[in-house]
Amino acid sequence: MAQATISGKFGYTYQANTNDTGVKSTGMAVSDGDVNFSASEDLGAGLKASVFMGIRLRGREVNSDGATDGIGARDSKLTLTGGFGSLTVGSVAAGSGIVSRGTAGAPGEGLDDDGEILDAEVNGVDLLQYTTPSFGGASVYVQVIDSIGNPGAGGTETTSTVLSANAIGVNYSAGPISASVDTTSYSAHAAAVATAANGQLEDRVRLSASYDLGVAKVGFGMQTKGYVLAENTQTVYGVSVPMGALTLGVAYGKNSTKIKATSVSTDNTGINWGANYALSKRTNVQLSYRVIDTAASTTDTKSTRVRLMHSF
C-alpha cells in the first residue's frame, strides 16, 4: 500500500474590529484549519510521481467570515519529476503571488485576507505546468491555465463567465536571495467581458523578491494588471526580525486602480504589525494589529487579533 503523509494546521483567534463609522465587533472563531495528504512513488529510471490533496476544516461548519462553508476543497495536484524537470496538473488557488516574498514572512493577519488590499485566494484554477530543472538556482516554468473562477454544479464550468490564461515565469533562489517574475495573458468569453467592471482582464506582470540579512529579512512585491478600461497596480513591502523564539514584523500594501478614460485613480492601503512567539516548533501565539484605509471611508477598519496556532 502507498504510504501517505498527513499534515495540517489549526488556528483559533480572538479578534476586535472597529470601522470609521464607529461600529465595533468582537468575537472568537476558527481562523485556520487544513488537513493535507501527500504521497510519492518511485517509478524507476529517475522518475517520481507525487500527489498533494488538501481539505479545509473550519470547526462546526462555520468559518471566520461567518459563512457556513467550514469544510471545503483546497489545492490538489499531481506532479511527475525527472531529469527533464517536472510536470504538474491539478486544481489550485490563484492567490496574490507577491505576498510570500513581498512581506518577508512578517507575522500578522495579512493584507490579502479576504482581498482587503492585495489579491486573495478567491479563485480556483485548473492548470498544466512545466518547470525546467534548476540552473544555478534559477528555473523557468510555463503554465496553461483554465477555468479561473468557481466551477458549476457537478464540476462543470459556465463557459460564458470563466477566464483562461497562459503564463511564463522564472523563480530564483540562492543564498539569501529569493525572487520571482512572471507574465500572464488572459482570454475570456464575451459575457465575461460584458459583466466585468473594468472590462476584460488582458494581462498581468508580477515581480517579488526577498533578501535575508541575517538579523532581518526584507521583501518587496509588485503586480500590474491591464484591463480594457483600467490599469491596476499592487505593491507590498515587508520586514521581519527574528529574535530567538520571537519574530517581529511589519508589512505595507497599496492597491491603485486608474480608469483609462478619466485618469482618475482609486487608492487603498493597508499596514499590518505583528509579533509571533514560538512555544515549540509546531505551536505558536501571534498578536497582530492591522489598519485598512480604503477610498470608501466607511469600509476603513482597524483590527486587533490574537491567534493560537498548532501545526502537525
Image: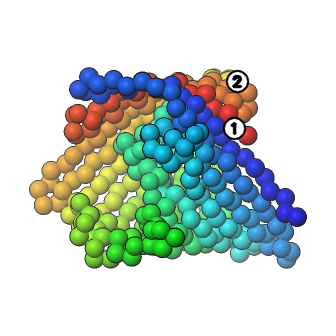
Percent across and percent down for residue 168 are 50, 69
- Tag count in the figure? 2
Taking 104 as reference, is 83 above or below it?
below
Q: Residue furthest left?
A: 262
Q: Residues within 10 Å of mark 2 (few under 14, many from 20)?
A: few
Residue 301: percent from left, percent from top: 32, 30
Of residues 57 and 61, the one nearer the viewer is: 61
Q: Amino acid at mark 2?
A: Leu
Mark 1 residue type: Ser
Which residue shows up at 69% across the image and 30% down it? 283
SS for dot 1: strand
Whether residue 200 can be seen here? yes
Which residue corresponds to mark 2? Answer: 279
Could you tell me residue 182's position as x and y percent? 47, 62
Q: Choose top left, top right, bottom left or bottom right for residue 300.
A: top left
Looking at the rendered structure, the secondary structure element under dot 2 is loop
Which residue is found at the position 79% from the left and 63% from the top? 40
Q: Earlier in the sequence, mark 1 or mark 2?
A: 2
Measure the alpha-carbon separation of dots 1 and 2.
Answer: 12 Å
Foreground mark, 1 or 2, reads 1
Q: Which residue is mark 1?
A: 311
Residue 238 in view (yes/no): no
What residue is drawn where x is 14% and y is 54%?
263
Q: Position of residue 248 (x, y in %)?
A: 55, 26
Q: Quadrant of residue 50?
A: bottom right
Residue 309 in the figure: left or right of residue 49:
left
Residue at left 50%, top 65%?
125
As drawn, is 178 to the left or to the right of 253? right
Looking at the image, residue 272 lies above or below residue 156: above
